[in-house]
Image (tube, grey):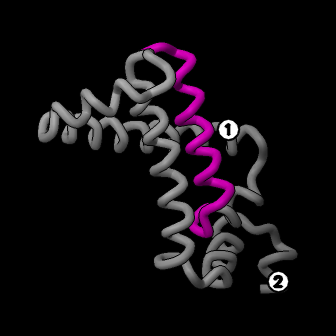
Amino acid sequence: MPWNLLIIPLVAGYYFLTRSNYSKFRQQRLDRQRLIFDSVIYGMVLLFVAFSVTTILTLALPDYVGQFRKFLPLGADYFGTSCLSLFIAYALAQGGNKYIWKDRNSQLQQAIRRVGNEMELMLL
């Protein structure tokens, strides 16, 4: 895998951290270095999920996957897998906000209890 393709899962992890109600309120209270570290962790998890999906699809439907790879603009190996991790992050963040983590207030309260300062805990 070309190393420059790893920036796409890093962006996917950052997108999930900043847009998902599950992690948005927590990461807003943490420092910049922790945001970078969490983005890397979430990006690698998303890349692993995308790699698993592409492996299963390649084993199940090799002809269709081969045809799809011809349409990708970049001929590098694993380009589709990296882009799939970004699409998975988008789908998880938007779908999770709509169906799973609908109640923003409970997520905010949970984040304050975990990493909030004394002022936020008192106001809660």
| Residue 25 higher or lower than 103, as above or below | above
Q: Quadrant of the C terminus?
A: bottom right
* CA–CA distance in space, label 1 to label 2: 29 Å
- Let me know if residue 124 is in the magenta part: no
In terms of depth relative to the viewer, which is nearer, 122 or 13?
A: 13
Number of the front mark, 1 or 2: 1
Residue at image coords 55%, 65%: 94
Q: Residue 22 sits in which quadrant? A: bottom right
**In the image, what residue type sits under mark 2?**
Met
Q: Position of residue 17 (x, y in %)?
A: 62, 54
Q: Is residue 3 left or right of residue 17?
A: left
Q: Quadrant of the N terminus?
A: top left
Vertical comparison of 3 with 72: above or below = above
- Residue 80 located left or right of residue 53: right
What residue is shown at x 49% (from left), y 48% (from top)? 87
Q: Which residues are magenta?
A: 1-23
In front here: 52 or 110?
Answer: 52
Q: Which residue is mark 2?
A: 122
Q: Main secondary structure of the magenta part?
A: helix
Residue at left offset 19%, top offset 40%: 56
Q: How many numbered tags mark residues here?
A: 2
- For residue 21, above or below residue 1: below
Q: Secondary structure at mark 2?
A: helix
**Residue beneath label 1, please?**
36
